[in-house]
Image: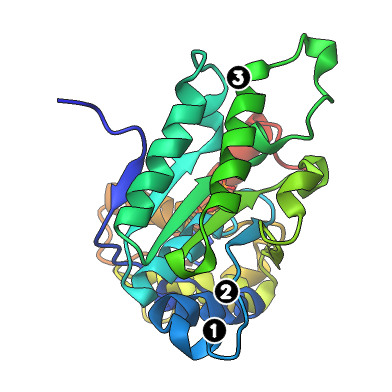
Amino acid sequence: SKAKLYDENSQVKVSFKDVAGLEGAKEEVEEIVQFLKSPEKYTRLGGKIPKGALLIGPPGTGKTLLAKAVAGEAQVPFFSLSGSDFVEMFVGVGASRVRDLFKNAKEKSPSIIFIDEIDAIGRARGKNNMTGGNDERENTLNQLLTEMDGFDTDTNVIVMAATNRADILDSALMRAGRFDRRIYVDLPEIHERKEIFKVHTKNLKIKETLDLEFLARQTPGFSGADIANICNEAALIAARKGKDAIDRQDFLDAVDRIIGGLEKKGKLIK
Ligand code: ATP
């Protein structure tokens, strides 16, 4: 059987409830949900529905989660691909993968295409000559631009892409009619961290007296992904100790462990 060149998930279960905080970003993508659900409502005065939206923000802040939630809320299929998959690709494969992806998304429209780490293919052209250039990456980028220009707005496929390096993207990607919406997804503030802790402890046995606000205060600079990690670690630590419920100390131990991991990876700047 022919291996799929991209991920397709027709039954996305993620909804906006799963995305904690990010109120501004959620409001902006809510509009995309409406475009997918009832495009006629928006185009009746001659306006065109945007083709693409770029989610910009640091790693682990919920960009992929948010894109999935859009598909889940609109109940449309979710096609995804990561830019980093293209880094070491044989000639011609990148462009054909992109072609294949758009063909399938169009067949199943309305649908969402999600391209994670778009900077890996969408870096400004001609800026990598120092490293000997990369024609295949350029072919892939050109194919992506061609596909986005090729579908007219009544195709009802919306392309969402994520990056933490919007500054290095090729300006062609940002041109009108391509990724003309930009949505910022930042590291969570204290009240958002509390919400993220709430989402990720929902299915855990935590002690009733556990103060999520306290945990939010202990975790400045942590991303949603880090917090999800802490919650899981805390559950494992408490279980190992034979406890019936996870308490404050387990969470603090988990925070220490995650900080240790981040320091090793050189991710922590504090
Ligand atoms: P990357 O840039 O590294 O791909 P990302 O911004 O796409 O990261 P996600 O993959 O969406 O981040 O987040 C990873 C996981 O972290 C999510 O699956 C979720 O469990 C958790 N998470 C991140 N942000 C949030 C949030 N705002 N609310 C709830 N969970 C979150």
Residue 73 position in % (x across, y down): 37, 76
> Which residue bears the numbered disc 1?
43
Above or below, 239 relative to 220: above
Asked whether 70 or 18 is in front, the reply is 70
Residue 142's label in the rendered image is none
Q: Residue at x 50, y 65 (%)?
A: 66
Q: Is residue 260 visible?
A: no
Quadrant of the snapshot with the N terminus: top left
- Mark 2 closeness class: few <14, some 14–19, many ≥20 residues within 10 Å: many
Residue 263 position in % (x across, y down): 68, 35
Q: Earlier in the sequence, mark 2 or mark 1?
A: 1
> Which residue bears the numbered disc 3?
136
Left or right of residue 231, residue 77 in this image? left
SS category of the residue bearing label 2: loop
Cβ atoms under marks 2 and 1 closer than 8 Å: yes
Q: Residue at x 39, y 67 (%)?
A: 71
Above or below, 155 relative to 105: below
Q: Quadrant of residue 13?
A: bottom left
Distance between the alpha carbons at the discs numbered 2 and 1: 7 Å
Residue type pointed to by label 2: Ile
The residue at label 3 has a CB less than 8 Å from ligand 1: no
SS category of the residue bearing label 1: helix
- Mark 3 closeness class: few <14, some 14–19, many ≥20 residues within 10 Å: many
SS category of the residue bearing label 3: helix
Residue 49's label in the rendered image is 2
Residue type pointed to by label 3: Glu
Residue type pointed to by label 1: Thr
